[in-house]
Amino acid sequence: MTNIESYKSHTLSNCWTISDTESYAMWKIYLNGQPEGIAIKSNVGELKSCLNENKAYTFYSGKVNYIPLTHKYIDVFSVSTNKREPYSYEREYQGTSFSAIYAAK
């Protein structure tokens, strides 16, 4: 887990729902009491294309798996793309970026 901790200053993660419809529950959770939010509609191909234009970062992305994370092999990507089953309603696609300096190590 020490490697995971060391990545924090060089890593950014974000997620998007891949559901075909909006979810009232998701809006309530992620707006956290704010009166309004914004939704951006895109697709995985467009997202990857936009992210890969930024050469200062190396991007990895994938569909989130809703399974327990085993401790046999843990890295930043497996931590950010695996969640426990209770979160499966989120149907997420996760993007993780590393600064190019750190990714080259």
Image (cartoon, helix red, strand yellow):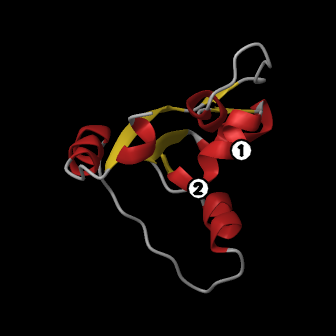
Task: Calculate the distance from the C-alpha at mark 2 to the C-alpha at mark 1.
Answer: 9 Å
- Depicted 61 relative to depicted 53: above or below: above
Quadrant in which the N terminus appears: top right
Residue 96: give x, y in percent of width and height: 48, 43
- The amino acid sitting under disc 1 is Glu
Please tell me the numbered disc located at residue 104.
Answer: none
For label 1, the SS is helix
Quadrant position of residue 84 = top right
Q: Which mark is residue 9?
A: 2
Residue at 68% from the left image edge and 38% from the top image edge: 4
Residue at point 28%, 49% (across, down)? 51
Amino acid under disc 2: Ser
Quadrant containing the C terminus is top left
Q: Report which quarter residue 102 is drawn in.
A: top left
- Residue occupying the point 68% across, 34% down: 3
Secondary element at tag 2: helix
The image quadrant that residue 88 belongs to is top right
User: Label for residue 5?
Assistant: 1
Vertical position of residue 20 compared to residue 105: above or below: below
Above or below residue 92? Residue 1 is: above
